Image (cartoon, rainbow, N blue to C red):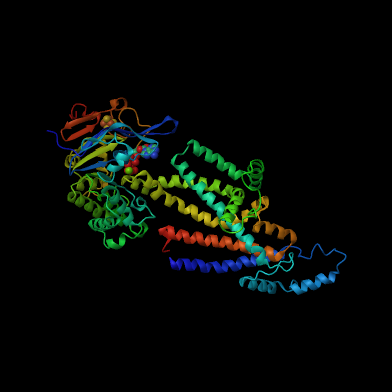
């Protein structure tokens, strides 16, 4: 029997139609599911399409981008067939999202209370008074002291960490089924990063949410995620349970990412980086998109694009090295 | 907030003094006085002019003249006109200044009512037909000189079609109450549009680009991610952020708008401060020229002050600076 899922993304393609007939394939055919209560990490270098995948789920892709095709189901319900208005009923209520930049993510001219309150009034039909009280409760839930005063303050009066807590308060306001956090701590002070992530995990448990955590920090992945999806060039190149992926990485790109992780025991010596740079999304090489940088590149890689292969029920990879079902030979 | 306002008002004072010195200095530096030009009149003894100069204090040292003028101005005594014998400058200016302010406000209202909605629409529907039309109109509005537009408007809408009066402030028959205001507004339509033309054109473009910028910002994306509807996004989240710099700029430019009224009033023979100003220059009526220049300067300063205070009220980020 198939396990119940919260989110099912199938063959999603999000392209940006640029000038001169160039097409940036920001998200190119990704398929994955998220189960109830699960934390799935989306990792990859800058430009690999993590944010665009997340924004596609929210249907917040801006022109010249467009979801070209695919299917996004929330508890079985197809979201891509909804009207704008219907989708707005889902956003913030069933799926919420937190962004990377807390400094600019809040509207500078409205108070914190107003910005939390409006989502409660919109989705839960609370009146002003109830919304205000609930906003205070939410701020306390995300660990903001002086909540009764903070609701009257404006974003510029708060620190980055506080603002991110406010963003989290808004995200959990309607107890969504799925929370998407796009590099929620990248812009924050290192000392605060762990606090925010711990808070997210605690809230996830408390409200029985699933979490799609976008990051390029494999340290964060190892600590917080259940399952990992590695993205490169708009595609999934590897997917596995965290332990499996960290101990038994298959894809040369995953290898490279792990190698660039600072290792406690061996210090900087192992701190290698993947050579070369990510090709632009409108000019991927023929064959395997990683072929321009891959240390294990073979002739076939320049000609034929590898497809995603299921190695074990828990592990899939996109690489010609595993063309025969994972047999390295 | 209050401290900020008070500080702003206090800065106003030295600026006013500077302004008065400049106005006075310029007036003194200009060649000639009310008697120049008549000096050749052979029927009048030059000695008489000299006596009058002496009596008016025109021969005193400059600083003394400045002190006398400035302290009189400060107490609201603008002096007497040299041209309209015995008429106080105040009586000359008062009614006309009001006319000009009405015209300025009316033109500003047109600008706001036209520029902001169209700018918003253009930002929402860039490269649409209306956006292109607005762009074209914008360039024309900026390129066509005020007086020319005014003359064409008079020719077409007043003389040919007879929709609007071509000159004056009221028809004269309606005094007082609603009828008078209706007539005033009717008279202000053409000069108001003419005066506001360039401003409308540029504020429209400004609103468009401001709105486009705001709609790209992170907090709009946040609002969308919260599931807020299009109306909320547009009118609550975006409008307030986009309109702040625009209203502020309008405040800063209100004085300049009044200065711009000088030419428009001339074209429409509108009895405002501008027509008086030009007549006074022709007549070398220095007390009037100086008073008007000073008042225009004060209007600009007050515009700046109000814009600043408005800005600190609506933009919470600068409230506690
Ligand atoms: N507005 C746009 N116009 C053209 N291309 C775009 C646009 N936005 C995104 N892209 C393309 O989409 C690709 C993926 O971008 P995305 O923001 O999803 O990367 P990311 O993995 O989130 O990177 P980062 O770690 O920097 O956030 C980029 O390489 C870029 O080419
Ligand atoms: S398919 Fe070839 S180039 Fe691509 S990752 Fe595998 S080995 Fe490297
Ligand atoms: Mg990103």
Kindly give the residue lying farthest to the left in the view shown.
A1
**Which quadrant does the N terminus of chain B fall into?**
bottom left
Q: Which of B126 and A205 is in front in this view?
A: B126
Give how far across and how far down residue A113 sits, in percent: 31, 57
The quarter holding residue B161 reads top right
* In this view, A305 is above or below B256: above
In the rendered structure, the answer to whether residue A291 lies left or right of residue B234 reads left
**Residue at the location (42% across, 57% down)?**
B315
Q: Which of A34 and B191 is in front in this view?
A: B191
Give how far across and how far down residue B3 sits, in percent: 45, 68
In the rendered structure, the answer to whether residue B181 lies left or right of residue A129 reads right
* In this view, B259 is above or below A83: below
The quarter holding residue B60 reads bottom right
Kindly give the residue lying farthest to the front in the view shown.
B173
* In this view, A107 is above or below B7: above
Q: Which of A82 and A66 is in front in this view?
A: A82
Give how far across and how far down residue B43 sits, in percent: 87, 66
Q: Which of B217 and B160 is in front in this view?
A: B160
Give how far across and how far down residue A76 sits, in percent: 21, 35
Q: Is residue B42 visible?
A: yes
User: Which quadrant of the render holds ligand 1?
Assistant: top left
């Amino acid at each position: 029997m198939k396990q119940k899922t919260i989110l099912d993304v199938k063959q999603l393609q999000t392209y940006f139609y640029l000038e001169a007939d160039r097409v940036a394939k920001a998200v190119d055919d990704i398929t994955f599911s998220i189960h109830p209560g699960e934390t799935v990490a989306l990792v990859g270098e800058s430009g690999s399409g993590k944010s665009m995948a997340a924004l596609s789920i929210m249907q917040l892709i801006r022109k010249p981008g467009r979801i070209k095709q695919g299917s996004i189901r929330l508890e079985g319900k197809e979201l891509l067939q909804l009207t704008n208005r219907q989708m707005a009923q889902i956003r913030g209520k069933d799926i919420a999202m937190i962004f990377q930049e807390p400094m600019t993510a809040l509207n500078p001219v409205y108070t914190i209370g107003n910005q939390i309150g409006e989502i409660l009034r919109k989705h839960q039909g609370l009146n002003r008074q109830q919304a205000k009280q609930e906003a205070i409760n939410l701020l306390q839930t995300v660990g903001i002291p002086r909540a009764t005063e903070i609701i009257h303050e404006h974003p510029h009066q708060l620190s980055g960490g506080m603002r991110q807590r406010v963003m989290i308060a808004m995200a959990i306001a309607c107890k969504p089924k799925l929370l998407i956090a796009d590099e929620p701590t990248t812009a924050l002070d290192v000392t605060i990063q762990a606090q925010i992530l711990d808070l997210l995990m605690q809230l996830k448990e408390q409200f029985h949410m699933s979490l799609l955590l976008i990051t390029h920090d494999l340290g964060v992945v190892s600590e917080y995620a259940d399952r990992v999806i590695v993205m490169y060039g708009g595609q999934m190149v590897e997917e596995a349970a965290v332990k499996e992926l960290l101990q038994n990485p298959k894809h040369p790109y995953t290898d490279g990412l792990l190698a660039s992780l600072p290792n406690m025991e061996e210090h900087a010596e192992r701190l290698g980086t993947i050579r070369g740079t990510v090709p632009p999304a409108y000019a991927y090489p023929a064959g395997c998109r990683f072929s321009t940088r891959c240390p294990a590149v073979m002739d076939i890689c320049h000609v034929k694009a590898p497809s995603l292969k299921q190695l074990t029920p828990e592990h899939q990879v996109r690489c010609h090295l595993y063309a025969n079902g994972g047999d390295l030979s | 907030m209050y401290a900020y306002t008070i500080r702003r008002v206090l800065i106003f004072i030295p600026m006013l003094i500077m302004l008065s010195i400049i106005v006075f200095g310029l007036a003194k530096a200009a060649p000639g006085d009310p008697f120049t030009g008549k000096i050749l009149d052979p029927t009048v003894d030059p000695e008489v002019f000299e006596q009058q100069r002496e009596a008016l204090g025109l021969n005193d040292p400059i600083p003394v003249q400045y002190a006398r003028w400035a302290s009189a101005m400060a107490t609201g005594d603008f002096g007497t006109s040299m041209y309209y014998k015995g008429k106080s400058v105040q009586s000359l200016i008062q009614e006309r200044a009001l006319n000009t302010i009405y015209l300025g406000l009316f033109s500003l209202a047109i600008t706001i009512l036209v520029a902001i909605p169209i700018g918003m629409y253009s930002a929402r529907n860039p490269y649409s037909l209306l956006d292109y039309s607005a762009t074209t109109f914008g360039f024309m509005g900026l390129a066509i000189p005020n007086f020319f537009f005014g003359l064409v408007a008079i020719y077409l809408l007043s003389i040919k079609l007879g929709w609007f009066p071509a000159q004056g402030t009221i028809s004269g028959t309606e005094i007082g109450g609603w009828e008078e205001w209706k007539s005033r507004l009717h008279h202000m339509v053409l000069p108001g549009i003419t005066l506001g033309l360039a401003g409308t054109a540029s504020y429209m473009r400004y609103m468009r680009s401001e709105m486009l910028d705001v709609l790209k910002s992170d907090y709009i994306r946040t609002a969308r991610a919260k599931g807020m509807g299009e109306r909320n996004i547009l009118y609550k989240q975006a409008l307030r952020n986009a309109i702040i710099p625009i209203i502020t700029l309008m405040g800063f430019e209100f004085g300049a708008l009044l200065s711009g009224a000088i030419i428009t009033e001339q074209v429409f023979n509108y009895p405002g401060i501008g027509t008086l100003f030009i007549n006074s220059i022709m007549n070398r009526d220095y007390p009037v020229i100086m008073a008007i220049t000073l008042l225009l300067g004060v209007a600009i300063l007050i515009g700046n002050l109000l814009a600043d205070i408005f800005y600190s009220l609506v933009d919470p980020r600068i409230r506690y600076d």
